[in-house]
Amino acid sequence: MRIKICGLNPIRDVQICIDLKVDFLGFVFYQKSPRNINLNEVTNLLKYKKQKSSFVAVTVNPADEFIKNTVVKNFDYIQLHGNETKERVKEIKSMGLKVIKALKVKDESDINRYKEFEEADILLFDTPGMQKSLEFPKNLISKLPKGDKYALAGSISINNIENINKLGPNFFDLSSSLESQLGYKDHLKINNFMKKVKLINENTAI
């Protein structure tokens, strides 16, 4: 099972996520978000030994200048939450980044859009709310494509991840369910969640 935790603070939250072997650490660059990070804090990321974790810049229709000056130097992946086309995905990959393309899902026809974005390294199936923590439609979860390339976001928590995992997804993106207050990650919640993930992985391997 692969895990991405989004909306992290470059100073407070990184080391615990690395220590707990979180696969992808997401940092939000979107001014309307309560989880938006200050550009001045980005350089703090260079201080960490990432081990097997990857750093992800979460963006909405990012400009080339921002990608080249900020993302390429500090991140392994860029996550695209805007209306980027498949051509734009190719352009960004050519700058030397791996790409996570988010697809907003309301109905089954939205899921099939993933076929347009074969160039993306990871496809993230998300709710239309982005910052509103909407629940992903339960009836559509089993219809998602299977494999490590496909991630699911939308009200995933320690309480439901085991049941959702049984429906097929094996790659999860979390944010608000791991917070004690809006925009602040709760390290105890992160620790307990990753313990749960480890237990599920161990039981699956038996």
Image (tube, rainbow, N blue to C red):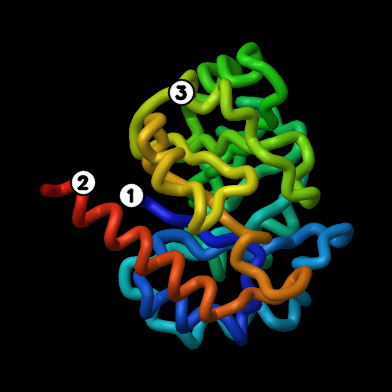
Q: What kind of residue is marked 3?
A: Ser
Q: Kindly identify the residue that appears in the image at 37 percent across and 51 percent down.
A: 2
Can residue 71 be seen here? The reply is no
Residue 187, position as x, y percentages in the image: 54, 80
**Real-space Cα separation, disc 3 to disc 2, in angstroms:** 18 Å
Q: Give the spatial CA distance, label 3 vs label 1.
A: 16 Å
What mark, if any, has residue 204 been given in the picture? 2
| CA gap, disc 2 and disc 1 | 10 Å
Farthest right residue in view:
32
Pick whichever of labels 2 and 1 is earlier in the sequence: 1
Q: Does residue 203 appear to the left or right of 114 in the view shown?
A: left
The residue depicted at 67 percent of the width and 60 percent of the height is 176
Q: Residue at x 49, y 87 (%)?
A: 47
Which circle's residue, 3 or 1, is located before the other in the chain? 1
At horizontal 51% and vertical 65% (from top left) the residue drawn is 25
Mark carried by residue 142:
3
Q: Cβ–Cβ below 8 Å for labels 2 and 1?
A: yes
Residue 151 visible in the shown view: yes
Q: Secondary structure at mark 3?
A: loop
Amino acid carrying mark 1 in the image: Met
Q: Given the image, on which type of amino acid does mark 2 rest?
A: Thr
What residue is disc 1 on? 1
**Percent x, y for residue 21?**
35, 69
